[in-house]
Amino acid sequence: MRIVILLLGSIVFSLSAFAQQQAPRWEFGIQGEYGRDWYHKEDAPLGSYEGSIIDFSSNRSWGAGFYFERSLNPRWSVLGQVGYAQKKVHPQLFHMYNQTTAHYLSEVHHRGSIDAGLRWYLNPQSKISLFVDGKVGANVFMSAVRQEKTHGRIVHSNVFGFQRVAPVASVSLGIKWSRLTISAEYRDDLSVSKRVGGMSEISGRGFVGKVAFALFRVKK
């Protein structure tokens, strides 16, 4: 009888400890990303000019930001992130069709982003968990900085007349071990960004590798 009581007590204790380990919790951290973007640009008939590049890519894209994750149960969690990114592109791809007199040496775009979504863990009991997630949010075109041969650094705060905010969707595949998360993310604009006056429109998609680290964890 004593053995049975001890056995039942051990089972209850183990289940209680397991439940505490699986208790929902908040996680806050930092993340960095590096990758590349691809763009599709369409000019209006009057704005087209010979030699225009319709499909092009960035030379590089890097960024950093903050994220949070709220566990709902061992398999599902809600997450959100806010970030900033710099995208180096070949100069004179976003410019108006009649801006051909200046000679630009480089061009860097500054963008912000915010999104939220759901994450699903395939093997939550493992020390190294595999996950997939999907998010929707907004991509904000903050400014463009060009280096011109004669006039030097030029800041285009009007982002060449394009719409600043574009809705975006993304999907990620990655692994999580303790506080460290490594993932690959594909993102795609849900609509085109049009230039004032209808001269042209542009849409983008990107692929980045991401590394995140949890700074704070709060158990409920």
Image: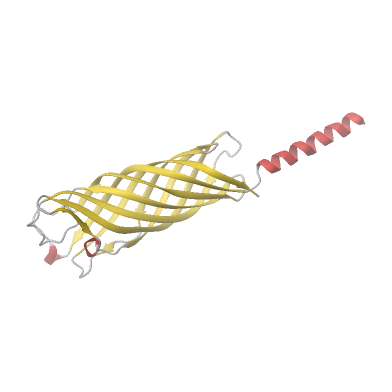
Q: Residue furthest bottom?
A: 197
**Residue drawn 65% across and 43% down?**
22
Q: How is the image coloured?
A: secondary structure
- Left or right of 209 on screen, residue 28: right
Percent across and percent down for residue 8 are 83, 36
Front one among 156 and 207: 156
Residue at position x 13%, y 64% from top? 47
Residue 209 percent location from the top left of the image = 38, 40
Classify residue 196 by image quadrant: bottom left
Quarter occupied by residue 40: bottom left
Residue 39, x across and y down, in percent? 25, 52
Extreme residue in the top direction:
3
Front position in the image: 48 or 6:
6
Left or right position of 51 against 16: left
Q: Kindly identify the residue that appears in the image at 69 percent across and 43 percent down.
A: 20
The answer to which quarter of the image holds residue 194 is: bottom left
Q: From this view, report whether residue 180 is shown above or below residue 45.
A: above
User: Relative to 139, does residue 56 appear above or below in the rendering?
Assistant: above
Residue nearer the viewer, 187 or 151? 151
Residue 81 is situated, as x and y percent measured from the top left of the image, at: 45, 52
The residue at the point 49 percent across, 45 percent down is: 29
Please give the count of numbered marks on the rendered protein: 0
Where, quadrant-wise, is the N terminus in this rendering? Answer: top right
